[in-house]
Image: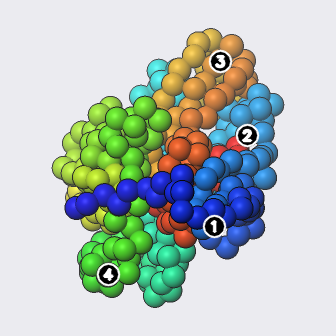
Amino acid sequence: MTVRPRIKTDRPYFHLEEMVLNMGPQHPSMHGVLRLVLRLNGELVIDVDPALGYLHRGFEKLAENRTYYQYLSMLSRCDYLSGIFMEWAYVRAVEDLMEIEVPERAEYLRVIAGELNRIASHQISIGDFLLNLGTWTPFFWTFRDREDILDLLEMLTGQRMMYNYMRVGGVKEDLPDGFESACRSFLRTFPKMVDQYEQLVTDNEIFLTRTLGIGVYEPDEAVDYGLTGPNLRGSGVAWDLRKAEGYSVYPKLDFEVPVGRHGDCYDRYKCRIEEFRQSVRIIEQALDGLPGGPVNVKTPPMLRPPAGEIYRAVESPRGEWGNYLVSNGGLRPYRLKLRDPSYVAISTLPRILPGNNIADVIAIAGSLDPIMGAVDR
């Protein structure tokens, strides 16, 4: 594949006056309330300044005024499309700080809930990305199939988005009656739906024109910026915390890490498509190998982790979501720092957007899949 070069900005044979254009914070193609201040020469992007903060709620500071359990229920509101992973990283940090051993059945349930949440998040990512490029049908298809997953997560957690399912030492409750059969039914039909997405989109000439060679991150560049998740793996770097760190019961499960070759919008799309199929494999194995036993351990109602600091992360749909937790031995976290992959992706826009046409801004930003609830935490 030939990577499309960026357009040079110093053409001597014509001149257009530069214009400053605000794209967002309420632009219909922005993933949340992101404002991009673009400096344009005609339709060519000369410079970009991401303006953040429209959803700022002080998530990290609020942790200092909540007990460990009180703060847990807030985390699903951060990256509101992948709340399971927000909770998971947090409880992992507290558990390791307190040296709590999680029952094996609870770890399997965490994996099942997490991979269902990964599929649901990628459905919105791909659906919105394709809608931004001008196609409606895949948007409706992905949201149609996402409803089935939200039904499953509602059976499991009691909520369709703000789950509050994780607990320090396990999960809130065991599988409800009927969940396993409903989940297996979904796993049988969903791969056919993914095939439909691909038949409509993947080899579509218009889609290829809009994505091939657009928004290219070289592997070294992606690593230097700190990109993770599909945004990094699309550049050919096979880094996935489920494999690299091997947390929970992922080492017992057989799955592959999809990677791209060119680091463009197309490869980031393909990585998410392939992750649909890998998540189905993971959930099927987790259901087949689900052990018996308790789903949590008894913990005191008011947690007091010993003084110390710890960093724990999970592989969320957007990449490495981490919690750096500092405890002074009290009832509340002394400090908490959240590591968000969407913030890292937004930070690359001033480097990747200049030299592209304004129409490509939508494709590139959409392919990075940022969630502003986490960026503006």
Would you place residue 93 above or below residue 202 in this image? above
The mark that comes first in sequence, 1 or 2, is: 1
Residue 191 at what x, y percent from top left? 27, 75
Question: Quick one: SS at disc 1?
Answer: loop
The mark that comes first in sequence, 3 or 2, is: 2
Which of the 4 quarters of the picture holds residue 61? Answer: top right
Would you place residue 235 above or below residue 338 in this image? below
Residue placed under numbered mark 4 in the picture: 205
- Distance from label 4 to label 2 (Cα)? 43 Å
Residue placed under numbered mark 2 in the picture: 59
Q: Nearer the viewer, residue 286 or 361?
A: 361
Residue placed under numbered mark 3 in the picture: 327
Number of residues whose C-alpha sits closer than 10 Å to that of mark 4, classed few (under 14), some (14–19) or many (20 or more): few
Q: Quadrant of the C terminus?
A: top right
Picture residue at 46% right of the left edge, 88% below the top: 137
The mark that comes first in sequence, 4 or 1, is: 1
Picture residue at 71% right of the left edge, 59% below the top: 18
Which of the 4 quarters of the picture holds residue 158? Answer: bottom right
Check contact, mark 4 vs mark 1: CB within 8 A.
Answer: no
In front of the other: label 3 or label 4?
4
In front of the other: label 1 or label 2?
1
Q: Quadrant of the N terminus?
A: bottom left
Residue 260 at what x, y percent from top left? 27, 54
Number of residues whose C-alpha sits closer than 10 Å to that of mark 1, classed few (under 14), some (14–19) or many (20 or more): some
Residue 311 at what x, y percent from top left? 51, 25
Picture residue at 63% right of the left edge, 50% below the top: 47
Asked if one can make out residue 176 in the rendered structure from this viewpoint, the answer is no
The mark that comes first in sequence, 3 or 4, is: 4
Amino acid under label 4? Glu
